[in-house]
């Protein structure tokens, strides 16, 4: 009887990924990124195992962790993670003249690494390798996606920071775990810094004020100060720098008057708009800090007072308010008084940004004459229905026109006598 021979088992091809969804998701990202930069025709060259290799050679953003000794709830860490993940998917990163998401850039990094490390000598990749590597090197793509990730993580913690409650800071690190397969991770550690408040005597009353701060790299945090020389004669003391505070009134007016911008975006803009003050605007007896939106559009001013050795932002004036250059010019041109501007809500961003200027050229010309027509760019920040604001702007311009006619008629009657 012949002996049965044990059949030798064929070696199984190496598998890199244990996540069944990871490779299909990566393939979709990579194809989209290659299409953006004009290389989609080469995508069919890749075998599944090669795409699987690339998918594990990209950096994975891990769930944020707490900085040792800092009390942050699990739900807040999850919120930070969710916001980061949304940001990583938004196409806001300039790469080779195109806007792509950090995740798409990350997929190109995986491709570049594959072409540089694994595909050398494989004939079917010769043309792709030559063309692609002349424009994209893995080290260059890694630098871009690192900067992009840091920008998104910073934006998240600025969204969630609030001078009346708490500030956040963060630190990221890239980590490679030498295992099978090698795991590439982008870790983030979050710290929390409690708000500081003081009571100041302002116009005979004790008022609460909140100190303004900013996050710095490597989980550091600092309180904002300004050079005393920037405020001119508004300060007579000996300190070289003044700590910066803000009143609740200013925060409330900011929210009320920039009413189509959500609260988290206002947090972001407040910190970025005050963290590096280089100049103030001196207007009459007022000390004004111009305030700009995401689109670098000036929307108004913080009114500052120096109280003791502190600089305090006491209120926020929309750009059409009296006591601002644009607001006083509006009063001069249109005849609108302070009560008119408030009644017609011409002191709110929604009234102007959401106005249908195509059907109201008079309003457009007025905004241009005031130099504030850039406000119309902020229509993308819509969070309220448009119809009410369109009607309000139209009725306001009719009111201004009626006022001008009444003035002309009165002048005509006076000249007749």
Image (cartoon, rainbow, N blue to C red):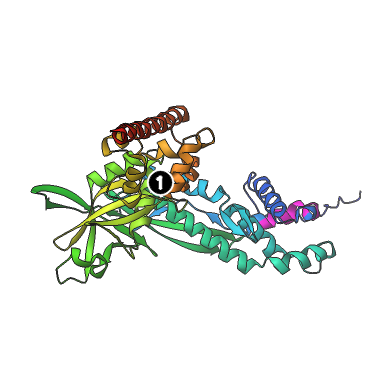
The spot of residue 289 in percent (x, y) is 31, 56
Task: Look at the image and say whether residue 182 sits in the magenta stretch.
Answer: no
The spot of residue 202 in percent (x, y) is 12, 51
- 30 lies above or below 125: above
| Type of secondary structure dominating the magenta stretch | helix
**Residue 275's quadrant in the figure?**
bottom left
For residue 355, side relative to residue 32 (left or right): left
> Which residue occupies the foreground of this view, 223 or 25?
223
**Residue 343's quadrant in the figure?**
top left
Query: Image quadrant for the C terminus?
Result: top left
One can see residue 126 in this view: yes
Residue at (23% x, 44% y) in the render: 249
Task: Look at the image and say whether residue 49 sits in the magenta stretch.
Answer: yes
For residue 331, side relative to residue 145 (left or right): left
What residue sits right under mark 1 in the picture? 265
For residue 80, side relative to residue 341 (left or right): right
One can see residue 15 in this view: no
- Where are the magenta residues, as a range? 43-54
- 5 lies above or below 337: below
> Which residue occupies the foreground of this view, 255 or 2?
255
Residue at (80% x, 53% y) in the render: 41
> Which residue occupies the foreground of this view, 152 or 244?
244
Which residue is at the far right? 1
Mark 1 lies on a secondary structure that is helix
The spot of residue 296 in percent (x, y) is 45, 54
The spot of residue 321 in percent (x, y) is 31, 44
């Amino acid at each position: 009887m012949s002996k049965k021979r044990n059949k030798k088992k064929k070696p199984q091809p190496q598998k890199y990924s244990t996540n069944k969804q990871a490779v299909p998701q990566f393939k979709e990202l990579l194809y989209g990124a290659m299409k953006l930069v004009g290389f989609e025709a080469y995508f069919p060259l890749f075998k599944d195992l090669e795409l699987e290799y690339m998918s594990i050679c990209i950096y994975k953003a891990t769930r944020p962790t707490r900085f040792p000794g800092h009390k942050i709830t699990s739900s807040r860490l999850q919120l930070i993670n969710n916001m980061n993940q949304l940001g990583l998917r938004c196409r806001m990163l300039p790469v080779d003249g195109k806007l792509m998401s950090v995740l798409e850039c990350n997929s190109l990094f995986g491709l570049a690494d594959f072409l540089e490390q694994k595909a050398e000598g494989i004939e079917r990749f010769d043309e792709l390798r030559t063309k692609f590597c002349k424009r994209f090197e893995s080290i260059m793509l890694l630098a871009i996606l690192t900067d992009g990730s840091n920008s998104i993580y910073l934006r998240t913690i600025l969204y969630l920071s609030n001078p009346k409650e708490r500030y956040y800071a963060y630190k990221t690190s890239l980590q490679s775990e030498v295992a099978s397969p090698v795991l590439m991770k982008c870790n983030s550690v979050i710290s929390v810094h409690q708000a500081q408040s003081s009571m100041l005597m302002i116009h005979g009353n004790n008022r609460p004020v909140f100190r303004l701060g900013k996050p710095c790299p490597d989980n550091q945090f600092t309180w904002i100060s300004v050079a005393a020389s920037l405020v001119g004669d508004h300060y007579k003391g000996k300190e070289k720098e003044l700590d910066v505070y803000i009143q609740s009134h200013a925060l409330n007016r900011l929210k009320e008057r920039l009413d189509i911008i959500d609260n988290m975006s206002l947090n972001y803009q407040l910190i970025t708009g005050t963290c590096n003050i280089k100049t103030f605007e001196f207007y009459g007896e007022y000390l004004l800090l111009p305030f700009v939106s995401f689109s670098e559009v000036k929307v108004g001013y913080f009114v500052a007072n120096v109280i003791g050795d502190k600089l305090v932002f006491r209120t926020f004036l929309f750009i059409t308010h009296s006591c601002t250059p644009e607001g006083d010019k509006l009063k001069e041109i249109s005849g609108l008084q302070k009560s008119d501007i408030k009644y017609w809500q011409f002191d709110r961003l929604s009234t102007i940004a959401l106005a249908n200027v195509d059907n109201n050229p008079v309003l457009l010309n007025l905004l241009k004459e005031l130099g504030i027509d850039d406000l119309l760019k902020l229509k993308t920040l819509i969070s309220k229905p448009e119809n009410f604001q369109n009607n309000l702007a139209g009725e306001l311009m009719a009111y201004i026109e009626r006022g001008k006619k009444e003035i002309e008629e009165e002048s005509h009657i006076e000249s007749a006598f």
